[in-house]
């Protein structure tokens, strides 16, 4: 390769279809590498994202449709705690990637739910590194089984949107290793993603895409990563430093189109080579890293993609994944609804259902089944007049003062609709003729902005509060049940109003099959089996990441992860702060009994086995969790940490299953600031249905 060819390969071709940049092979893809005709190196195509392939469904001068499937958001996928399901979702997305001519899916995202207000939490799995890693590894295996690449992102310490392109994250090395790097480490070792995306932020003063310590020492030398690293889009400020540090590919290329102070990245690299600041051997290493992967892509083998993946099959997988991720948070004889009993549905989210968040994690499916449509399609006895009222009212509002506009991602911006639409007399009448009420609360967030600690976001609006209070009073007066449906991507405040409901169902942002999932869960044909991958704190004041989103608060340049390793339940459990719904929590329509727990040390492995029996009268699945309390030694330890988990098959009433988790000693290690250590002493194993609902314990001395 000539020097020019090498330099051109390590820089993307620019934002596709903008200015005089190439249009790209796939309309709506996020980027491409350069084609080098002389060497028969084709352009490779990259597209988002975690909830489904994001490409344009309409193309100029083309009557064809290029829809993709909208899957549940990552947080909901993680609520399934089901590795097989994640693999299946990965396979489905991988098929769409391949059949639409894309080579790399820009997913999964494995940043940590450090704070409930991070605007992209919905794109991330969990507050726990192990659950995150296991979900990501299965997903990556699924995607790559289809002959296309996955991209694990954003490496690393990128847990907020506020000033994400400049903020400097300061975190102890222990917390970095145990909490934030851990998901990358485990998923890379297990599933070998073809690519990794460095993040926007700085870490200890240097951009992650310009950190040799991260990209060479940790990623390659310690973990043996064999793929290539790309920047996040327009990240960092020096292309030569990125190449030097081990960031192989600079995406999307042509930063100067946005930042006039920059030269072209190719120019920056060329000058650095000429001046001797960048070694030619280093550039060669980057080129090789990219080529070693490119030769595996469909583009390289000239794969003739069909542009017609089987969207029906994938819709069924999206539905199935959604059903496994619904979390039943409260149930005082409220659900499932009695067959045929009429019920009224309140809240505009029943029609304007939020299937996922905005930004690069947005999707373009052929349809979204709204909650109302799903319930009607399944023939549930929804109050038709109320439904009709909402249809008309929303249409009227949207065509007048509440019209939809479009944001910087071309995403819809929908002014918040009024929710308090029924007076006391109307509610009284509705509670007379219906047996139950559902109230839908919806939230949306997305890339580029964090959520707000305000009414309408973390808190209910005045309107929503009035609606809930009114419905609750009217229906409960007649002994009828009131059920809250949370159509949200990340926790909101629930403590102050949860008491007004007899049942609360967390539907998350469930993708295109939303309404079908809800209908089948509330009528009982699907028994919810999801458990929380993230804590719902009692009040925001309890959240340990108090420094979020950094300092100075109005325009942060630094964010210190002062809570260290005490993120999520590690904090709540260690410091005895009771959350409203704890990590790992989720109810079922049936009951499970845990028995015959055995914990034995066999050579270098701890083997935990137990029996879970369905003792209720409905078929169901149960997620069990293995927490470990490590001995106090040289360093402090959380009161418990998730070290393993599993999910039963669908157990019929009376049926039982034996489950086993094997843990190597290394999986019990802590980072002492310098190295991973397994402290000697007694390890307590707590087998739980959640982080607070421990069913059996046992000890092993290591
Ligand atoms: C996001 C990435 C995404 C990329 C390409 C960036 O703004 O942070 O997650 O993959 O854009 O769309």
Image (cartoon, grey):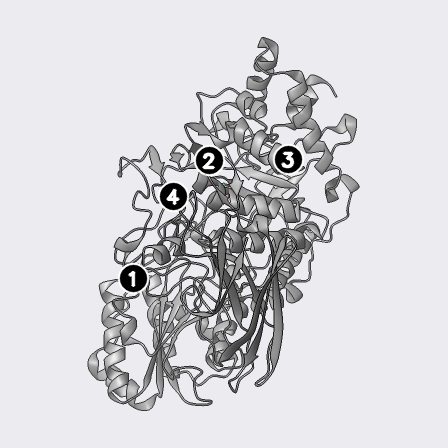
Instruction: Measure the C-alpha gap from mark 4 to mark 3.
Output: 30 Å
The residue at which mark 1 appears reads as 538
Q: Which mark is residue 564?
A: 4
Neighbor class of circle 1 (other Cα within 10 Å; few <14, some 14-19, many 20+) is some
Q: Is residue 50 above or below residue 34?
A: below
- Graded by Cα atoms within 10 Å as few (under 14), some (14 to 19) or many (20 or more), the crowding at tag 2 reads many
Proximity of marks 3 and 2: CB atoms separated by less than 8 Å:
no
As displayed, is residue 572 above or below residue 110?
A: below
Residue 1: horizontal and vertical position, in percent? 75, 21
Q: Is mark 2 within 8 Å of ligand 1?
A: yes
Q: Is residue 701 above or below residue 219?
A: below
Residue 119 vertical placement versus 529 (above, below): above
Q: Crowding near pointer 4: few (<14 within 10 Å), some, many (20+)?
A: some
| Mark 4, secondary structure of its residue | loop
Label of residue 200 in the image: 2
Secondary structure of the residue carrying tag 3 is: strand
Is tag 4's residue or tag 3's residue first in the polypeptide sequence?
A: 3
Q: Tell me the CA gap for discs 1 and 4.
A: 21 Å
Q: Which mark is residue 228?
A: 3
Which one is closest to the eye, mark 4 or mark 3? 4
Quadrant hosting residue 21: top right
Viewer-side label of 2, 4: 4
Left or right, residue 214 beside residue 188: left
Dot in front, 1 or 4: 4
Q: CA distance from mark 3 to mark 1?
A: 42 Å
In percent of width and height, residue 280 lies at 66, 16
Of residue 53 and residue 205, the one placed in the foreground of this image is 205
**Sequence-wise first label, 2 or 4:** 2
Q: CA distance from mark 2 to mark 4?
A: 21 Å
């Amino acid at each position: 390769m000539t020097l020019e060819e090498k330099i051109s390969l390590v820089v993307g071709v620019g934002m596709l279809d903008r200015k005089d940049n190439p249009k790209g092979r796939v309309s709506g893809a996020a980027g491409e590498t350069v084609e080098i005709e002389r060497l028969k190196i084709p352009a490779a195509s990259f597209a988002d994202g975690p909830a489904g392939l994001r490409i344009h469904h309409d193309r100029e001068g083309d009557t064809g449709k290029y829809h993709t499937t909208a899957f549940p958001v990552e947080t909901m996928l993680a609520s399934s705690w089901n590795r097989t399901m994640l693999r299946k979702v990965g396979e489905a997305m991988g098929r769409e990637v391949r059949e639409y001519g894309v080579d790399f899916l820009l997913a999964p995202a494995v940043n940590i739910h450090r704070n409930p207000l991070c605007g992209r939490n919905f794109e991330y799995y969990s507050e726990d590194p192990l659950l995150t890693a296991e979900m990501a590894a299965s997903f990556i295996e699924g995607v790559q089984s289809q002959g296309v690449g996955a991209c694990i992102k954003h490496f690393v310490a990128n847990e907020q949107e506020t000033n994400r392109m400049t903020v400097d994250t300061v975190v102890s090395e222990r917390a970095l290793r145990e909490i934030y790097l851990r998901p990358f480490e485990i998923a890379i070792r297990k599933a070998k993603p073809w690519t990794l995306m460095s993040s926007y932020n700085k870490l200890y003063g240097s951009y992650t895409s310009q950190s040799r310590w991260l990209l060479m020492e940790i990623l390659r030398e310690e973990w043996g990563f064999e793929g290539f690293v790309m920047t996040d889009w327009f990240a960092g400020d020096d292309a030569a430093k990125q190449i030097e540090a081990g960031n192989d590919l600079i995406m999307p290329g042509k930063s100067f189109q946005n930042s006039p102070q920059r030269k072209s990245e190719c120019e920056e690299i060329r000058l650095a080579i000429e001046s001797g600041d960048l070694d030619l051997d280093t550039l060669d290493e980057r080129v090789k890293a990219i080529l070693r992967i490119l030769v595996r892509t469909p583009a390289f083998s000239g794969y003739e993609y069909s542009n017609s993946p089987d969207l029906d099959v994938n819709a069924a997988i999206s539905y199935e994944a959604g059903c496994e991720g619904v979390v039943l948070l409260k149930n005082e004889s409220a659900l499932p609804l009695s067959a045929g009993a009429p019920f009224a549905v309140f809240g505009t989210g029943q029609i304007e259902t939020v299937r996922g968040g905005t930004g690069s994690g947005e999707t373009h499916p052929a349809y979204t089944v709204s909650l109302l449509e799903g319930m009607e399609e399944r023939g549930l006895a929804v109050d038709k007049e109320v439904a009709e009222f909402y249809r008309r009212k929303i249409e009227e509002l949207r065509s007048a003062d509440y019209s939809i506009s479009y944001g910087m991602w071309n995403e819809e911006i929908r002014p918040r609709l009024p929710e308090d639409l029924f007076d006391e007399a109307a509610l009284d009448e509705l509670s007379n003729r219906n047996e139950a009420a559902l109230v839908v609360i919806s939230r949306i967030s997305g890339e580029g902005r964090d959520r707000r600690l305000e009414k309408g976001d973390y808190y209910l609006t005045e309107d929503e509060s009035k609606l809930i209070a009114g419905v609750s009073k009217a229906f409960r007066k007649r002994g009828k049940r009131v059920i809250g449906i949370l159509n949200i991507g990340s926790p909101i405040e629930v403590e102050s109003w949860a008491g007004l409901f007899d049942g609360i169902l967390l539907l998350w942002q469930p993708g295109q099959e939303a309404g079908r999932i809800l209908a089948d869960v509330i009528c009982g044909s699907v028994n919810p089996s999801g458990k929380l991958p993230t804590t719902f704190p009692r009040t925001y004041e309890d959240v340990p990441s108090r420094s979020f989103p950094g300092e100075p608060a109005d325009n942060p340049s630094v964010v210190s992860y002062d809570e260290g390793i005490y993120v999520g339940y590690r904090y709540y459990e260690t410091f005895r702060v009771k959350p409203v719904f704890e990590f790992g929590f989720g109810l079922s329509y049936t009951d499970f009994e845990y028995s015959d727990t055995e914990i034995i040390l066999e050579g270098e492995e701890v083997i935990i086995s137990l029996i879970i029996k369905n003792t209720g009268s409905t078929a169901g699945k149960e997620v069990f969790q293995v927490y470990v309390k490590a001995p106090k030694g040289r360093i402090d330890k959380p009161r418990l940490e998730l070290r393993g988990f599993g999910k039963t098959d669908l157990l019929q009433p009376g049926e039982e299953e034996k489950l086993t988790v094997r843990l190597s000693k290394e999986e019990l290690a802590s980072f002492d600031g310098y190295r991973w250590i397994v402290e000697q002493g007694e390890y307590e194993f707590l087998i739980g249905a959640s982080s607070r609902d421990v069913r059996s314990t046992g000890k092993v001395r290591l």
